[in-house]
């Protein structure tokens, strides 16, 4: 499966090299695009050390959603990995297993892995948007309580964490990408409801995991700025949830059919070719 990787950075000089090294080792033919949001710590210099990486430098911090849209617009691969710069990919089968989620069902527009964080020498499951489902919450609780075995089969979920997911580029284009009114946070419910309204589904793959340091960019900011962004996060998330639910409800009250999904389009293409 052909795919590209896009990364949005802001003051990630200490982490971006690890991710780019993993991409080079595990997916050497993957095209990588990095959009840097005016970092001041030498992040761009770290990216330049890796030949073959497309670097776009913004003069100001335009936020995650706009920068992610910029990056995706630069690639023409059928599938795109959207990755945070503070990720590490320890599993060689990471790309293949997530790609299989999309290959087996054309209705699936996006897939994501579990995210682990190392603390005191132990790896713990981070709580992300991806677990907001019955099976997801059960998986998270079982992991934290140390009971049962981790399942290895992908399952449907409404939300996926936008810092680590594989998405069909055609689906991203069809929904108009991420809503750029959300500077940071809010992109998960925004993406989820737009995919749902277009007839797509998302999958969480519990058999695949990444290491995620989490919020390394925020830690580079002054405390007052961090608090302001956190406060804005609650507003963005509430707004994205409200907009998504309202539009979905409006569709159903009008009796409007869900817009054509990848499955129906694939069927139409096969019919036209006969």
Image (cartoon, rainbow, N blue to C red):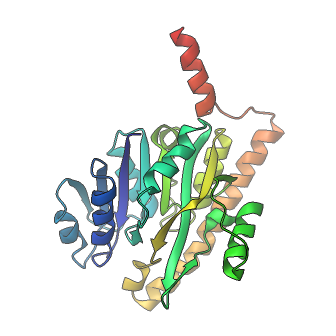
Q: Is residue 62 above or below residue 212?
A: above
Between 45 and 1, which is closer to the camera in this rendering? 1
Q: Is residue 154 above or below residue 171?
A: below
Can you give x and y, in whole percent of width and height, for residue 258 in the image?
A: 70, 35
Q: Is residue 82 above or below residue 43?
A: above
Can you give x and y, in whole percent of width and height, for residue 199 in the image?
A: 66, 38
Can you give x and y, in whole percent of width and height, for residue 75 in the image?
A: 33, 43
Q: Quadrant of residue 105?
A: top right
Q: Is residue 227 left or right of residue 40?
A: right
Which residue in the rendered view is the most extreme toward the top? 274
Between 267 and 66, which is closer to the camera in this rendering? 267
Viewer can see residue 175:
no
Pick the quarter of the image with the C terminus: top right
Residue drawn at (68%, 69%), measured in percent from left and top? 149
Pick the quarter of the image with the N terminus: top left
Q: Quadrant of residue 161?
A: bottom right
Can you give x and y, in whole percent of width and height, for residue 5 in the image?
A: 36, 53
Q: Is residue 16 left or right of residue 78?
A: left
Viewer can see residue 71:
yes
Residue drawn at (46%, 57%), measured in percent from left and top? 94
Between 206 and 159, which is closer to the camera in this rendering? 206
Residue drawn at (16%, 66%), measured in percent from left and top? 49
Between 78 and 190, which is closer to the camera in this rendering? 78
Residue drawn at (53%, 74%), measured in percent from left and top? 116
């Amino acid at each position: 499966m052909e795919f590209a990787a896009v990364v949005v950075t802001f003051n990630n000089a200490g982490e971006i090299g690890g991710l780019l090294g993993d991409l080079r080792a595990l997916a050497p033919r993957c095209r990588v695009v990095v959009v840097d949001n005016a970092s001041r710590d030498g992040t761009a210099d770290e990216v330049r050390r890796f030949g073959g990486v497309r670097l776009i430098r913004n003069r100001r911090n335009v936020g995650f959603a706009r920068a992610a849209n910029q990056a995706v617009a630069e690639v023409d691969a059928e599938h795109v990995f959207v990755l945070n710069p503070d990720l590490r990919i320890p599993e060689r089968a990471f790309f293949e297993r997530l790609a299989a989620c999309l290959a087996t069902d054309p209705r699936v527009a996006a897939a994501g892995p579990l995210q682990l964080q190392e603390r005191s020498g132990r790896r713990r499951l981070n709580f992300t948007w991806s677990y907001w489902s019955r099976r997801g919450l059960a998986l998270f609780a079982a992991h934290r309580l140390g009971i049962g075995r981790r399942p290895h089969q992908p399952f449907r979920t409404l939300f996926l964490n936008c810092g680590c997911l594989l998405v069909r580029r055609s689906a991203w284009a069809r929904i108009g990408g991420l809503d750029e009114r959300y500077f940071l946070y809010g992109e998960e419910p925004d993406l989820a409801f737009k995919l749902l309204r277009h007839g797509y589904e998302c999958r969480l793959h519990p058999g695949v995991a990444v290491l995620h340091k989490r919020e390394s960019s925020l830690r580079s900011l002054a405390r007052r700025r961090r608090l302001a962004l956190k406060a804005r996060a609650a507003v963005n998330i509430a707004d994205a949830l409200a907009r998504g639910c309202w539009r979905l409800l409006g569709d159903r009250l009008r009796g409007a059919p869900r817009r054509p999904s990848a499955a129906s389009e694939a069927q139409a293409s096969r019919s036209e070719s006969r």
